[in-house]
Amino acid sequence: MKRLLPVIVVCLAAMVAGSPAQAHNRSLAIRGADVSSLAKSEAYGGIYRDAHGRRGDALRILADGGLNWIRLRVWVNPPDGFNDKAHVLAIARRAERAGLKLLVDFHYSDSWADPGKQNKPAAWASLSYDDLKKAVYNHTYDVLNALKRQGTPADMVQTGNELNGGLLWPDGQWDNWPGMAGLLGAAYDAVKAVSPRTKVAIHLANGGDNGLYRWWFDNAAANGIRYDVIGLSYYPYWHGTLEAFQANINDVATHYGKPVYVAETAYPFTTADKDGWENIMTSAEPFPGYQATPDGQKALIAKVADIVRAVPNGLGLGLFYWDATWTGVKGNGWDPYDPTSGNAWENQALFDFNDRLLPAVRAIR
């Protein structure tokens, strides 16, 4: 039976392989949304409605809209108390009831970890390297084992978020590949100790930059970094043309022989602001040919989905829309250290300013 414990994600990829025409029409194996903002939004009064205006559970609304996965980030000791283990467990229970699979995104920080910053949690700041590896293992194991024990095991895990420059700087920084490999190895071992069937993903940003991906994963191979799946962030207004993204995701899948998915993508449905905090994206046409309208949002996401469907050998698994539930709710700001901060993303959510589900969800499904 052990040999029959499937490499689930790889099998999903193989099942959907086919001709280009079939790939264009097939349903993505992963039709997902990052909903990491949901618990905090609801705590501050956020509500969600389906496309007809009927109020309901955001997770069920997304599932009824055709999605089948959610993604949740987890911080170590977040100062605002959200995106911690307890909230991940609570959302995971709701996701299971809605029939949604779960991707857990470990940031290994008390706040945002991304290409520009990979700050250690305060509790880990003075640890030796060996103790830091133990902390990574224990934290990863603790969260995933708690999910497993409550009957909502993670289907896939990202051992770090947008790891362009590594993690837990400086011990796992880009110029210290052996250090990075040891930390990611500890995380990988923890995932597999909880459940050998759970897939481990490595996630980078800048999805249109093939040079970055070749450099990173060639070094990963040279240093024995283990993983099952490759995740890419692709925001068209930051990460290059659709053609560059397509060339990169195709090359990454075929060169490294791993299933691939878009870990993060999004697009604005309006230029307006709801909460008084200036939006990140304010242009009427953030990417050439796609307006900041509900139709423009849908069209851009449909194009990204088509590119993933067409990855050779059926290795394109799907995508996650980021952050689908981060609507303009006062109090649900971006900075966990500053309760007065606002949301610069509400014009890119999957729910409009009347809290209704947007048509872009149909492009994902």
Image: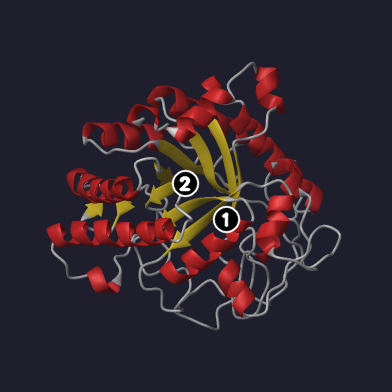
Element class at badge 2 = loop
Numbered circles on residues, count: 2
Q: Is residue 321 left or right of residue 213?
A: right
- Residue with the mark numbered 2: 155
**Image quarter of the C terminus:** top right
Vertical position of residue 48 compared to residue 158: above or below: below
Alpha carbon of mark 2 to alpha carbon of mark 1: how far?
11 Å
- Residue with the mark numbered 1: 96
**Residue 218 image point, x, y percent:** 30, 31
Q: Which mark is residue 238?
A: none
Q: Is residue 45 left or right of residue 141?
A: right
Residue beneath the point at 50% across and 40% down: 207
Vertical position of residue 341 compared to residue 352: above or below: below
Q: Quadrant of residue 225?
A: top left
Dot 1: within a 10 Å radius of its alpha carbon, few (fewer than 14), some, or many (20 or more) residues?
some
Q: N-terminal of the two: label 2 or label 1?
A: 1
**Residue 277 image point, x, y percent:** 64, 75
> As rendered, which of 76 and 113 lies closer to the eye?
76
Element class at badge 1 = helix
Amino acid type, callout 1: Glu
Amino acid type, callout 2: Asp
Q: Is residue 21 left or right of residue 226?
A: right
